[in-house]
Amino acid sequence: MNKPLILPLNGKTPKIHDTAFVAPGCAIIGDVEIGPQASIWYNCVLRADINFIRIGARTNVQDGSVIHVETDYGDGGHPAIIGDDVLIGHMALVHGCILHDRAFVGMGAIVMDGCEIEGDAMLAAGAMLTPNKKMPAGQLWSGRPAKFMRALSEADKFGMQRGVKGYVHEAEMHIEALRALDAERG
């Protein structure tokens, strides 16, 4: 299968679960762990050169997104810790923050150092969550800087989980298509 760039750095080699999908064109660098059935889509960069990145089960990081960390200046810095069943939209920037299980980061959104998005919370497309902000569970935030807009409905939460399941299925299809392409090329 076509391979992404998996780069050991500073004595740390990325650990990618056998069932995870990492698309060609991605760069996975340093102290990164990617959980089962997670998917890292085309042209994403996960750079854990100065702290660590953890990505949970069934989480998807969509095309062109960047995940990075803040350095440890003796205070632990800010790693990027991303839970299970998280949706990260296309072209998002996630930097030194915590995304709890079932969090959602919309397309083109920015999550800055020290931020925390609790479960079943959604940062809208294009929004910017400024440093050290905490989004409580079940809320939608939007804008630059992001602010509370409304509580999420049960339908909103169901839609987010449907998206997680859809990306697990999509990843399986892409894995098979890439295998077929490699077999065809011999």
Image (spheres, rainbow, N blue to C red):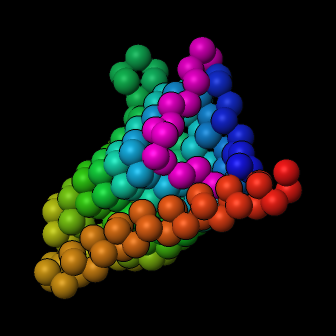
Relative to 107, residue 82 above or below = above
Q: Residue at x 43, y 52 (%)?
A: 38
Magenta stretch, main secondary structure, is loop
- How far across and down, in percent of the image, does residue 18 sit? 49, 40
Q: Residue at x 26, y 75 (%)?
A: 140
* Residue 14 shown in magenta: yes
Q: Residue at x 71, y 61 (%)?
A: 180
Q: Residue at x 34, y 68 (%)?
A: 165
| Residue range highlighted in magenta | 10-23
- How far across and down, in percent of the image, does residue 143 sit? 40, 76
Q: Say whether residue 161 is visible.
A: yes
Q: Say whether residue 150 is visible.
A: no
- How far across and down, in percent of the image, does residue 41 sit? 58, 59
Residue 165 as seen in the image, left or right of residue 42: left
Relative to 165, residue 1 above or below = above
Q: In this orientation, which residue lies closer to the viewer: 79 or 28?
A: 28
Q: In this orientation, which residue lies closer to the viewer: 144 or 151?
A: 151
Q: In this orientation, which residue lies closer to the viewer: 50 or 180?
A: 180
